[in-house]
């Protein structure tokens, strides 16, 4: 039973209420059983202590919710606090009071009593529950063990305090005493004070002690690590100083000074922008103040070396001779007129203007067409150095911009590294495989290239390592790619796209004859008197042993023949001339690897020769249609893409709309099944250009009229029968010529592309341009003499809505 002071009052309901002066506390919690010194300066607080001393020294201690409030109100003071006594009061000269107080019991504020001089509150003492002896002993033992563990880590805990805590048997007093000697947060101490249940309070205290022990251990580990690092640094400094003293005695110190002097002389003699010069002088000054063997000195020295080694203002003296440049380009490459023309235009402009920004060209084409080798020829034609950087598989932005100097082993990006290697600031810079870049968490290299390839920005390219603006505007950038869609749109916008569509059979023949064969004869140790290729042999290798847009495989096959001839020369030890003919090619290369489409043997019903474009050139495309009794099912096979299937459906719809005019049964689509097939079913096919071929095949099968076997066609069809333009016309006509086709039907709007067809081929093939499907049928289908395709009253759909026009005369041969 608690013995309350005399001023405590007990009512009939057995609850005790006390009227006590209140002392608000800041940043401290006074626990029961604890004696604590307090410094009091606020007027109301001093008055409260004076009132307590004048009576029975009893006072109520309560912590403020916020320590920053100087004049707390009732709402700023926590409700649970400690009932205690003032043991001693000492007034200081500055007006403040030093008080020694002792906590007695927990209490709770019930009401605030109105008092102008100090806070006066009505308090209810909190009666604590009693634990069982077993439970009490277990919790006290856990608290003691934890406190002893903490005392082993914290040397500020005295043995006397440790003994005092160990001797306490009352759980409540033990909890309050231990909590008072820990630097818990005020909120945690207040929680311990407000926790009435002894079991909960001891558990909370045990948790807080464990946390404090973990923090203390971590703090010790960090301090030990820092101390160890400092000792290591001091040791290194001491050893470096010893080494310097030894070197000085041996005369080696002078060598270090000579290195710095040499570096300073290089800086003075190097031509560079003022910004770079100021930066490197500042770094040199820093280097002179450092210990030569320190890690930081090595970083600074490497940085200075990089700046001094770069060709800031060093350029190749480019000769500008248009005729000579054109001659060099033609010597190295056959064809490729558009890129050659663009390069000569640049040289012409440069001859008129002294300072012109380097162009940024992008060569797009299939593998092996000579994109990279053309870039080398540009360097030779312009008298510049050549540097190549492959971007295939690059996925780190730092490969372009470099790493910042804070990283260990940091270096500039590949652009700056390449310029240092080449030693000139105006090379022809080939960025190979620009479409093969990828991105990951380290950044997007294609985004970093935006600054490099932008003529409005690359005069001040900022590498992360250099942290200086570097002028790239004099560089002739050439990028290469296989496919344009894989290049980001913003990057495409900064480059001039020049397409290299692939070589024709005619061009491949001349490349093999003038370039590849002499090159492989020389590489394989042969001479012109050892081997000779006929024209038909070269064409056989091109058509039957390679299928590519470029000439890489063609060169391999020629090399294979040369190696076999070299073996024969060594074996027979004679200078016999080996003639490679069309028939002897199979002897050296084996059976043909490929076959190209050839014209059909005879005119057939439902079979039309179409034309297709692939990355390795043009191909003949056979379209077959069968009409069978059925219920109107349309079957389309041959591994076709969605666009090609839609073209077939559009062709069927056109035929249905023109059935009466074409003298076809109006109900054919209900009584018959139509099967459209395009052979070589393992090869994916797509695109709209087979539209008129499919339509012609359907009409042929329905009207039972054969199709001319020597006619090939290409064009997109609309529902109204209009023939729309297509792409890849040059490759398609070359494929037709190779396959023995005599006439090719093309859309009228593609006539502008006929200028790209070699004259020797255009003379051998008759080109028929059409605007409407009716014209296609009149040129492709075979009729009996005097027969007509359409009824006399037939009117073809006009291309202008609301009008009709008479179709062209369709007299049959």
Image: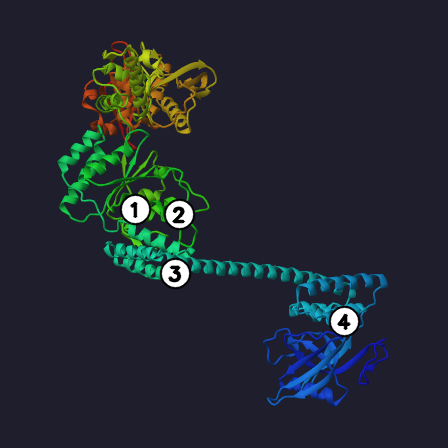
Q: Which of the two discs, 4 and 3, labels the residue nearer the N terminus?
A: 4
Q: Tell me: residue 481, above or below residue 264.
A: above
Identify the mark at residue 293; answer none if there is no mark. Answer: none
Q: In the depicted view, which residue is nearer to us: 407 or 203?
A: 407
Residue at the spot of label 1: 420
Q: Are marks 3 and 2 in contact (CB under 8 Å)?
A: no
**Residue topped by disc 4:** 164
Q: Residue furthest front?
A: 249
First in residue order: circle 1 vs circle 2: 2
* Left or right, 4 with reference to 280: right
Q: Secondary structure at mark 4?
A: helix
User: In the image, residue 671 lies at what x, y percent?
Assistant: 45, 16
- Looking at this view, is 226 or 255 the one in front? 255
Q: What residue would you read off at disc 2?
A: 398
Crowd tier of the residue under label 3, counting other residues whose Cα lies within 10 Å: few below 14, some 14–19, many 20 or above:
some
Q: Position of residue 604 (x, y in %)?
A: 34, 11
The picture places residue 104, in percent across and down from the top left corner, at 77, 77
**Disc 1 vs disc 2: Cβ atoms closer than 8 Å?**
no
Which residue corresponds to mark 3?
Answer: 290
Circle 2 sits in a helix, a strand or a loop, which is it? Answer: helix
Which is closer to the viewer, label 3 or label 2? 3
Which is nearer the eye, 664 or 62? 62
Does 196 sit above or below residue 115? above
Where is the N terminus found, in terms of image quarters?
A: bottom right
Q: Residue at x 21, y 20 (%)?
A: 761
């Amino acid at each position: 039973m608690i013995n309350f002071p005399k001023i405590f009052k007990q009512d009939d309901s057995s609850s005790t209420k006390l009227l006590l002066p209140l002392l608000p506390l800041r940043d401290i919690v006074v626990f029961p059983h604890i004696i604590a010194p307090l410094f009091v300066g606020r007027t109301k607080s001093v008055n409260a202590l004076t009132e307590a001393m004048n009576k029975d020294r009893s006072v109520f201690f309560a912590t403020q919710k916020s320590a920053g409030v100087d004049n707390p109100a009732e709402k700023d003071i926590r409700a649970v606090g400690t009932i205690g006594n003032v043991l001693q009061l000492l007034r200081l000269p500055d007006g403040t009071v030093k008080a020694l107080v002792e906590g007695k019991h927990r209490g709770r504020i019930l009401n605030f009593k109105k008092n102008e001089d100090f806070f006066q509150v009505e308090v209810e003492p909190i009666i604590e529950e009693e634990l069982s002896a077993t439970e009490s002993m277990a919790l006290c033992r856990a608290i003691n063990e934890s406190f002893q563990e903490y005392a082993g880590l914290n040397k500020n805990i005295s043995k006397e305090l440790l003994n005092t805590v160990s001797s306490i048997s009352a759980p409540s007093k033990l909890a309050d005493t231990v909590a008072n000697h820990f630097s818990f947060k005020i909120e945690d101490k207040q929680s311990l004070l407000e926790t009435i249940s002894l079991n909960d309070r001891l558990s909370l205290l045990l948790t807080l002690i464990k946390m404090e022990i973990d923090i203390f251990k971590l703090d010790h580990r960090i301090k030990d690590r820092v101390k160890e690092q400092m000792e290591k640094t001091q040791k290194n400094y001491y050893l470096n100083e010893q080494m310097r003293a030894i070197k000085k005695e041996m005369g080696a110190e002078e060598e270090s000074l000579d290195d710095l002097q040499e570096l300073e002389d290089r800086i003075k003699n190097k031509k560079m922008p003022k910004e770079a010069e100021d930066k490197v002088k500042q770094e040199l000054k820093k280097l002179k103040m450092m210990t030569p063997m320190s890690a930081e000195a090595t970083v600074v020295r490497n940085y200075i070396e990089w700046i001094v080694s770069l060709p800031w203002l060093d350029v190749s003296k480019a000769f500008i001779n248009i005729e000579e440049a054109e001659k060099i380009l033609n010597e190295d490459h056959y064809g490729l007129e558009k890129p050659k023309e663009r390069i000569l235009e640049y040289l012409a402009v440069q001859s008129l203007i002294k300072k012109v920004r380097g162009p940024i060209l992008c060569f797009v084409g299939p593998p092996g067409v000579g994109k990279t080798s053309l870039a080398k020829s540009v360097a030779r034609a312009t008298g510049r150095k050549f540097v190549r950087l492959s971007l295939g598989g690059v996925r780190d932005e730092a490969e372009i911009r470099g790493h910042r100097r804070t990283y260990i082993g940091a270096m500039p990006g590949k652009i700056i590294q390449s310029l240092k290697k080449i030693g000139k600031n105006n090379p022809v810079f080939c960025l190979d495989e620009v479409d093969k870049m990828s991105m990951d968490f380290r950044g997007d290299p294609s985004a970093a290239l935006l600054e490099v390839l932008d003529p409005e920005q690359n005069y001040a390219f900022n590498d992360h390592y250099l942290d200086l603006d570097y002028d790239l505007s004099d560089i002739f950038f050439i990028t290469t790619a296989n496919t344009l869609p894989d290049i980001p749109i913003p990057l495409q916008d900064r480059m001039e796209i020049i397409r290299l569509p692939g070589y024709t059979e005619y061009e491949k023949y001349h490349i093999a004859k003038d370039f590849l064969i002499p090159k492989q004869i020389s590489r394989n140790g042969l001479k012109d008197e050892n081997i000779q290729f006929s024209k038909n042999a070269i064409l056989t290798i091109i058509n039957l042993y390679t299928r590519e847009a470029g000439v890489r495989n063609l060169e391999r096959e020629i090399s294979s023949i040369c190696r076999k001839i070299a073996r024969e020369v060594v074996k027979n030890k004679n200078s016999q001339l080996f003639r490679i003919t069309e028939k002897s090619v199979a002897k050296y290369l084996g059976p043909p690897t490929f076959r190209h489409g050839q014209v059909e043997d005879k005119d057939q019903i439902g079979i039309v020769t179409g034309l297709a474009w692939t990355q390795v050139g043009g191909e003949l495309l056979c379209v077959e249609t069968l009409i069978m009794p059925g219920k109107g099912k349309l079957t389309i096979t041959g591994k076709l893409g969605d666009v090609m299937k839609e073209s077939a459906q559009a062709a069927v719809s056109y035929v249905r709309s023109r059935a009466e005019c074409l003298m076809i049964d109006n109900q054919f689509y209900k009584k018959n099944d139509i099967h459209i097939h395009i052979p070589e079913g393992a090869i994916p096919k797509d695109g709209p250009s087979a539209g008129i071929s499919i339509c012609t095949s359907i009409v042929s099968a329905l009207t039972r009229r054969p199709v001319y076997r020597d006619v090939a066609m290409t064009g997109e069809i609309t529902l109204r029968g209009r023939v729309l333009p297509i792409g890849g016309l040059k490759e398609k006509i070359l494929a037709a010529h190779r396959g023995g086709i005599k006439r090719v039907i093309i859309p009228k709007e593609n006539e502008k592309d006929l200028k790209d067809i070699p004259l020797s081929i255009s003379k051998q093939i008759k080109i028929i341009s059409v605007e409407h499907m009716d014209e296609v049928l009149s040129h492709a289908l075979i009729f009996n003499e005097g027969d007509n395709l359409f009824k006399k009253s037939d009117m073809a759909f006009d291309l202008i809505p609301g009008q009709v026009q008479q179709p062209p005369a369709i007299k049959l041969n």
